[in-house]
Image: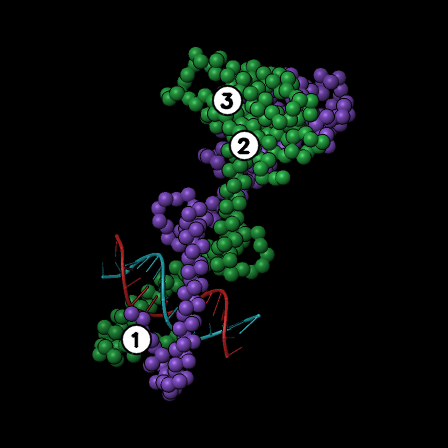
Chain colours: A green, B purple, C red, D cyan
Amino acid sequence: MPVNQSFALDGEKGKKIGVSGAKTVAALKSHSEAERRRRDRINAHLESLRGLVPSKEKMDKATLLAEVISQVKQLKTTAKQASEGLHVPMDTDDVEVEMLENNVGHGSLLLRASICCEYRPELLSDLRQAIDDLPVHVMKCEISTLGGRVKSVFLLTTTGEGNNGNAVSSVRAALCNILEKVSASADYAQPLFFPRKRQRVSYVDSSCLSS
Amino acid sequence: MPVNQSFALDGEKGKKIGVSGAKTVAALKSHSEAERRRRDRINAHLESLRGLVPSKEKMDKATLLAEVISQVKQLKTTAKQASEGLHVPMDTDDVEVEMLENNVGHGSLLLRASICCEYRPELLSDLRQAIDDLPVHVMKCEISTLGGRVKSVFLLTTTGEGNNGNAVSSVRAALCNILEKVSASADYAQPLFFPRKRQRVSYVDSSCLSS
DNA sequence: TTCAACACGTGAACC
DNA sequence: TGGTTCACGTGTTGA
């Protein structure tokens, strides 16, 4: 049972309990009702968040919010890796080669190589030729197109013929060659307003993460 | 300035204001402090959610939670589509067409179409021709190869020219035509309405993980 | 008993 | 001025 402390306060401050008191109590009533609506709104959203979080137990409000935070972060990273990292071609030419694992088989390496550039008819055959000339094995190839741009991602394993130590650099060099060919053949056509980034080569060594 | 209403209540209930009153006021103090800690915890999580939401304005608590809810739903669908995007071609020929949403634009549909078959040189141009002949728009295309087999996944939106109701069936028919061309070139008869399952037994996949 | 979590009403601040 | 949002202290309930 809620206590109306305005009685005591009115008495202390000498206020009259009359018409002005009725106005005050009406204002307080609408105020408390508005506050109750606000609480209900927030709690309703909290409840729908409870439905979205993959947990079966009833959780504390704070722990529920913490769970939501961690899930949002997780989803953001996976969505980012999926959309930007792997599938969707960006509008800057790019070559990336990274080593994923070094214990696939007997000293063979697992590489992830990607090239992103403008599409041209000879691109796919050039890619195939370049990969065939390398001492690598294509485990998986993925080609994505978006608006005339192409992003190609390869999962490669070294065949162990050559030196595995420079496998990353040799693959990167081969892909950069293809990028150069693209740039040379596309020199006459520059539809963009600003000078395009021709070649951005990045190399991530993931071997430091795992022993 | 907070009002300590225990004075009036103690007077009404006839309680003594003395040692027991001191204990009561101490209990109330610890209680309010605990409640304050709880509020701080919740608000801290709310603040970190504010940092995660892609909005620059300061938002209401309720609208912030609503924004978080919509973002979680959005991220869930994109993450799911991304994980679906990593598709490895299987050893069986297959055509799949499904409707993802029906409220993309003004009555246009979002379709996901995929075809999985053996690679042949004319496959890509055939695919392009078939898609171009359909009243659809290619939002995203993804081609994956594994050991000579190809899986191609399209994200399509209907242009609204034809009847959206049979968009799924027309796309499926076009893709099945391509599948039949593959089969025809392989000198093999095929059933009429269902995508044929054709086991690929010609050679062992050299890109298996063991080596 | 104490503790943790919740809803409630209220004062204050800001349009 | 009302209207709205927030923080606070408190009553209550269940472990």
Residue A22 as seen in the image, left or right of residue B128: left
Q: Which residue is mark 3?
A: A117
Instruction: Return the x and y of residue B61 as percentages of the image width and height.
Output: 39, 54
Specify the amino acid type for callout 3.
Answer: Cys
Q: Are marks 1 and 3 on the same chain?
A: yes
Q: Which residue is mark 1?
A: A6
Mark toward the viewer: 3 or 2 = 2
Mark 2 belongs to chain:
A
Q: Which residue is mark 2?
A: A204
Mark 3 vs 2: CB contact within 8 A: no
Instruction: Return the x and y of residue A132 as percentages of the image width and height.
Output: 65, 18
Q: Could you classify mark 1 by the number of other residues whose Cα lies within 10 Å: few (under 14), some (14-19), or many (20 or more)? A: some
| Distance Cα–Cα, label 1 vs label 3 | 74 Å
Residue A156 as seen in the image, left or right of residue B1: right
Image quadrant in which you'd find residue A36: bottom left
Which numbered tag is attached to residue A14? none
Instruction: Return the x and y of residue A175 as percentages of the image width and height.
Output: 56, 21
Mark 3 belongs to chain:
A
| Distance Cα–Cα, label 2 vs label 1 | 68 Å
Q: Residue at x 31, y 68 (%)?
A: A28
